[in-house]
Amino acid sequence: MNRFDYHRPATLAEALVLGATPGAAYLAAGTNLLDLMKLGVARPGVLVDVTRLPGLDRIERLPDGATRIGAMVRNSDLARDDGILRDYPALAEAILAGASAQLRNAATVGGNLMQKTRCRYFQDMASACNRRSPGAGCDAVGGVDEGMAILGWSDACIATHPSDFCVPLAALDAVVEIAGPAGAREVPVTAFHHLPGLTPAQDTALAPGELVTAIRLPPAAAGFRQHARYMKLRERTSYAFALVSVAAMLRWEDGTIREARLALGGVAARPWRATDAEALLAGAALGRDAFEAAAHAALADARPANGGEAKIELARRLIVRTLMLAAAGTPARIPALPASPFAATEESLTHA
Amino acid sequence: MTYPLTLTINGTAQSLRLDDPRVTLLDLLRERLHLTGAKKGCDRGQCGACTVLVDGRRVNSCLTLALSVDGAAVTTVEGLARGETLHPVQAAFIEHDAFQCGFCTPGQIVSAVGLIAEGEAGTDPERIREGMSGNICRCGAYHGIVEAVLAAQAARTAEERKTA
């Protein structure tokens, strides 16, 4: 690991001054950043520890019905929060489907947004990677990994964003609150992660020195709580990143879908909101036919980056399955195996 | 430049100075405080052998910068027994043959203590397996580990009923 200076500022204003230092990086739990520093992939000269900044560790209900989640809220605290479990159950299920209990106890909301791709070539210093080293080329193209992107990729980069949490956030129209040297601003979570294009190293909307301070869920996000699911396919039952994941949410009356939300994980460099599929579902009769059509629409532009055609079929089936599960109802309690297609049938699908 | 650091380790307050901010909590425990119970397995947060409790919560000490937990209470496997009396989870691991080579065992035991304190898995083996999935055992002693956690959980529940 490279040598760095360590600072633990007491206020956001101090943190932003330190964060503007060339070569500085913000440190939250460090579950991703420290790992990348050990590999030599990240080499910050200054670490600005933001875990103790006041006011960033709260979950608040705002007067308009929105929910603000501070960037330093730990994943396990978020997934245990009564209000989150009641109003955004798919968000809690996605968090519990990610990482391990130890990592969830440490990892933060802000860090989850900022985590880097788990592309093996990005993490291997002996491989060429445009995301790590602009202009170097991409050894993942034509490489051994068939789990790469199927949507939104470019010849410069075929990596995926690994987050589970960000997938339901995208479906729920979450907004990222940002502080920086030029003041505060906000960005929809669906625009926060950049598609690679020709500049994969510029992976988020953050300018140098900017810091994620909170995630905000708009009032309408609570309207799907009775029919909201997150499902995740991975290479083992637990503690693995998604091959493909799906967040699906429905509102309907008298057998007609009023509004649907659909987002995919593990398929692109950002959590992928499937707006065409949502438009198709709105007004359709609730049932498998509509869900099959939605899956087809969501993947109309999908192309395998590395001969990974299987991933498109996995995504298609998982979209249909997750919509079926959402239609059946949110479980009263998150299953023992969160988001798993191998979970036992739940006794009760009546969510409060 | 040195960095001051105060930690309560297994109940004893310690004032330390670090000459290098790169020291992880795991390296601090093992190399400077000679508490070698927590193991350096993968050093990447993937195996769980380094699991310790920080303010009562189980975390991977290999991915925790020591300076970032300044002021915290840290419990390692060395801090679980009371004199010659093993912690109930330690006793249950012996009783249920929950290890073979033993390398992952300190992490498994501390993780199980954390899991039981979280109070969410209860006596559902599936929830215990899922809750312990951050601890890899290459000998494959998982069956015994789940049995041990179940037994420790049951003993704790019985104890709570007695005192209630």
Image: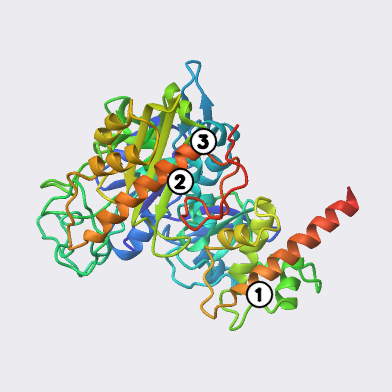
For the residue carrying disc 2, how many other residues have a C-alpha within 10 Å: few (<14), some (14-19), or many (20+)?
many
Q: Are marks 1 and 3 in contact (CB under 8 Å)?
A: no
Which quadrant of the structure image shows residue B82?
bottom right
Label placed on residue B144: 1
Query: Residue A133, how many percent across, how many down?
Result: 16, 57
Q: Nearer the viewer, mark 3 or mark 2?
A: 2
Query: Residue A22, how many percent across, how many down?
Result: 24, 44
User: Closer to the N terminus: mark 3 or mark 2?
Assistant: 3
For the residue carrying disc 1, how many other residues have a C-alpha within 10 Å: few (<14), some (14-19), or many (20+)?
some
Q: Are marks 1 and 3 on the same chain?
A: no
Q: Which residue is mark 3?
A: A57
Subunit ID for the residue under disc 1: B
Q: Which residue is mark 2?
A: A94
Kindly state the secondary structure of the residue where label 1 is placed.
helix
User: Viewer-proximal residue, A45 or B101?
Assistant: B101
Q: Quadrant of the N terminus of chain B?
A: bottom left
Kindly state the secondary structure of the residue where label 2 is placed.
helix
The answer for how far apart the CA atoms under marks 1 and 3 are is 38 Å
Which quadrant of the structure image shows residue A286?
top left
Q: Most extreme residue toward the top, as rendered? A: A63
Tell me the residue at 43%/65% (across/down).
Answer: A236
A222 vs A274, left or right, is right
Amino acid, disc 3: Asp
Query: Residue A145, how many percent across, how many down?
Result: 24, 66
Amino acid, disc 2: Ala
B3 vs A198, left or right, is right
User: Viewer-proximal residue, A271 or A275?
Assistant: A275
Tell me the residue at 37%/27% (across/down).
Answer: A259
The answer for how far apart the CA atoms under marks 2 and 1 are is 29 Å
